[in-house]
Amino acid sequence: MPRHAPKADVNDDHLSVSAPKSSAAGIPAVVSSLRHGLDQMGPKRTMLTLLKVNQQDGFDCPGCAWPEPGKRHTAEFCENGAKAVAEEATVRRVTPEFFAEHPVSDLAQRSDYWLGQQGRLTHPMYKAADSDHYEPIAWDEAFTVIARELGNLASPDEAVFYTSGRTSNEAAYLYQLFVRMAGTNNLPDCSNMCHESSGVALTETIGVGKGSVSVDDLEQADLIFVVGQNPGTNHPRMLSTLEAAKKRGAKIVTVNPLPEAGMTRFKNPQKPSGVVGKGTTLTDQFLQIRLNGDLALFQALNTLLVEAGAVDQEFVDSHTAGYEAYREHLATLDWDQVLHATGLDREEIDALLELVTNSERIIVCWAMGLTQHRNSVPTIREIVNFLLLRGNIGRPGAGVCPVRGHSNVQGDRTMGIYEKPKSEFLDALGAEFSFEPPREHGYDVVDSIAAMRDDKAKVFIAMGGNFVSATPDTAVTEAALRGCELTVQISTKPNRSHGVTGRQALILPTLGRTETDVQATGPQYVTVEDSMSVVHASRGRLAPASDHLLSEIAIVCRMARAVLGEDSAPWSDFEGDYSLIRDSIERVIPGFDDFNARAEEGFVLPHPPRDERRFTTSTGAANFTVNPLHVLNVEEDELILQTLRSHDQYNTTIYGLDDRYRGIKQGRRVVFVSPDDLAKLGFADGDMVDLVAGERRADNFRVVAYPTARSCAAAYFPETNALVPLDSTAEGSNTPTSKSVIIRLESATG
């Protein structure tokens, strides 16, 4: 029976639990930011570095993708952004001596927290097939290993090329070019595991798989929904935007199974009222929804809008298709199903209707709380239906707002990191570089794991990220990687994926966002795209952590030269002058006119639905869709588990062992369950349990009685990734269903 046991270096003996907080940020956030900075960087380095975060002459935060406001603060960063910068700009170093002391078998038993605390990688390292140790390797020799193993494959499709969302636009563009010149579209990326459902649903309904709003729109909105999202931990600078919206009179509705401190009250550390005052109450109506009940909620709301005659009929007639079929579907709504699926009272939904009908400009924001269910794509389509009914697409202060995680995950997709590329993009890429790109769709993340498991893929190369800890079904993923002939990790710091390797393995250390990048033609900068389609420059200011580091662009160019040959593309020119890469991007990808000239100031990419109410869908209009209501039912002894982050965490990077807002200190193996459910199941606060999902188990979790929705539970990933089956994915997007895992609690076995 697959298990995922605690790692040897994690000690929860000092775990303590207190009441959750009712406000976010304020003085504690400032103290935490400084503490992490001083611990990792020292006083002077902390001040000089943090003052360059998200500044026009500085670097883009390596954390989330929330946009910068029009007028930037001197300290334009949040607590978790400060943690991300401190982790990258640390003065700690991981040298070859570290790997001599710690064999791969030891690294495999270490936690992400312990590994991340060791510091920055300094040298390229190689693990031979018959060795349990990484040893130093020269860069040219490392690329020779990659070329040899790729050359030994029976087909280019036996290689998988993963990308993390922190890769720059320039590096991502060259990476996908290299992969396609090598002959495959196997380009899985972290979007496959987060907002893929958003992209699929939005492309189908409005023609663009991105959000349609700006920061200014949020500040102009009458009503803002924050659904399945915890900005206080995952996108803290969003709280400042929501505060500004509140000051202008906006109402905010929060839809979430857990009450989160950031959406309750925000104490803005940039303002006196946030330091010594009470701060700002953000949420006007909190809907504590049952997990997977969001589709039912929006379908019920849409039914009430139609019944009340509160439809913008002029917009519907002029700009949409499919309305009559959709209206007929709403007439069949079963309210008993709605109330069961949502766990809400009819009075709560009626109160929400009043807020909606009193609002002209409405924005719906969401994150992974919506995108990681079996029915995620229909749920997001239903949200689009809601906005279309009131004409809230292409109107200032209104629209769709999927809030991205990694700071350039959206830009990577724009640059062509996608396993299902459009023919127009491939045509332009092929014309630019005089080759015929492969047309057959490649593997996404889930398909890549299955291909490695089934011996259909034998080489795995990751541009950033921590694949082992980010992916579902931990035991299957680890076995799949170990079955490869070669695994390659392009990284700044050690992580769990360095301990779970193929027969051979390479670690290629790269520059971080915070560091200067000097090439043959002088200092270089890169660009990123934020969550709202703004492209802008990012320029590091610190000296590199080691003289042996290469930039991501240099690594891609040298790898491509070793694999494809010197003349396959102007790789040496690209490595020496990043402006040449941007010139090529301008010729291949629409919207990047005058790229080099505009990059410094930043510019917004075109978005036809937002800009001109033009919808490039199959119908030429915004599409209403019919989304059958399926209720996720559980047995009396079962709970619906959602995986989530702690406050000392960003994706798979663990900054510490506390979750300050939820009252957790010095521990991560906790499961949050409502007191009523605990009483029904025969457990008490403080009990030790195993989480059991079919044949999968995650052992030794401390039960925390918590005000979450009934029949629901929550626990941190990656500790609970083992419970998510590889073949349990969202329909249409193939995203793992990490927010709707059916579990039972069993008394801990040890």
Image (cartoon, rainbow, N blue to C red):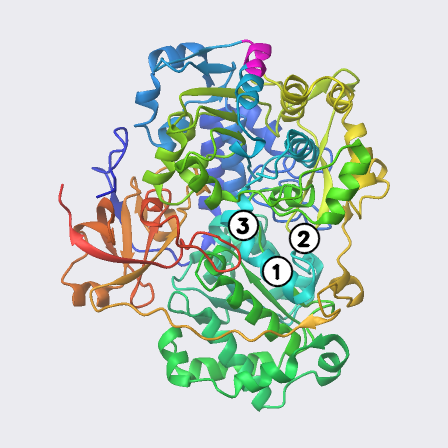
State the image coordinates of residue 388 (x, y, percent, origin top left).
66, 75
Q: Which residue is mark 1?
A: 401
Is disc 3 surrounded by few (<14), some (14 to 19) or many (20+) residues within 10 Å? many
Query: Magenta span has 181?
Result: no
User: Is tag 3's residue or tag 2's residue first in the polypeptide sequence?
Assistant: 3
Q: Which mark is residue 280?
A: none
State the residue at coordinates (74%, 36%). Answer: 436
Q: Which residue is mark 3?
A: 235
Q: Toward the viewer: 447 or 240?
A: 447
Specify the quadrant of the image occupied by residue 338.
bottom left
* Residue depth check, mark 3 versus mark 2: number of the one nearer the observer: 2
Magenta residues span: 138-144
Where's the N terminus, which quadrant? top left
Secondary structure predominantly adopted by residues drawn in magenta? helix
State the residue at coordinates (60%, 44%). Answer: 419
Q: Are marks 1 and 2 in contact (CB under 8 Å)?
A: yes
Q: Residue furthest bottom?
A: 308
Q: Secondary structure at mark 3?
A: loop
